[in-house]
Amino acid sequence: MTSLHDVFLGLGGNVGEPDKAMCAALAALDARPDTTVVAVSSLYRTPPWGKTDQPDFLNAAAHIRTRLEPKALLEACLDIERGLKRVRDERWGPRSIDIDILLYDEVSIEAEGLVIPHPRMAERAFVLLPLSEIAPERRLEGVRIGDLLQRLDLGGIEKRAPADQWWKPQAG
């Protein structure tokens, strides 16, 4: 039997209804027999990064456990994005949904189309703030996520909804 891997994902989008797209992506991952969503951060509104002449983003992070190996997980995430009508026209450009593999166990991978830990995540408050909610003690380049976050400018970032109020349908 294949072992379970601890994986942290970054999710985001800024066109259409990105919060609904992220909910659908998390539900699709959680519905897989080989993957379980363990925790999801709050939902944040964040200013665009890299290409700044576009609408603000909604961002979140998720902790999943999966039996999928890194390349297979990447393909599953890309399939979910395509199913949600993600269009890849422009680097750092507008998108309805983006699912990034941030951390996969404690491994580092550099392969065509896949780099783990995710490149430049230590420079991005929109990645580290939600990730710090669900994994403050995890380390990137030997430094705690929570400590890396202290080095970044959080200006313009606003919490939109706590984790338990945005991603999963409420019971009752």
Image (cartoon, grey):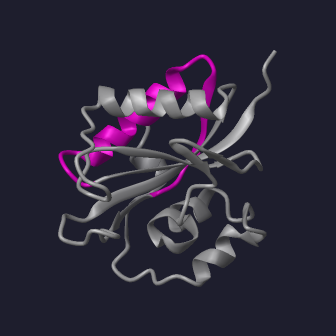
Q: Is residue 74 left or right of residue 87?
A: right
For the residue pair 62 and 114, the one nearer the viewer reads as 114
From the top left corner, tell me how far across and down residue 115 is, in percent: 59, 49
Which residue is at 31% across, 47% downward? 19
Which is more toward the observer, 150 or 68? 68
- Asked whether, in this view, residue 119 is left or right of residue 93, the answer is right
Say which quadrant the C terminus sits in: top left
Q: Is residue 169 visible to us here?
A: no
- Residue 16 magenta-highlighted: yes
Q: Tell me if 157 is positioned left or right of 138 in this view.
A: left
Identify which residue is drawn at 74% across, 45% down.
Answer: 105
Locate residue 160, reporting x and y percent. Answer: 35, 62
Res 144 → quadrant: bottom right
5 in relation to 163, above or below: above
Q: Is residue 133 left or right of residue 5?
A: left
Q: How many marks?
A: 0
Residue at 38% of width from left, 46% of height from top? 98
Query: Is 150 inside the magenta-drawn segment?
Result: no
First to last magenta residue range: 14-42
> Quadrant of residue 87 in the image?
top left
Q: The N terminus is located in which quarter?
A: top right
Percent x, y of residue 68: 65, 26
Q: Residue at x 55, y 60 (%)?
A: 119
**Can you say whether 170 is above or below 154 in the image?**
above
Is residue 32 visible to us here?
A: yes
The percent coordinates of residue 73 (x first, y second) are 57, 31
Q: Is residue 69 above or below residue 156?
A: above
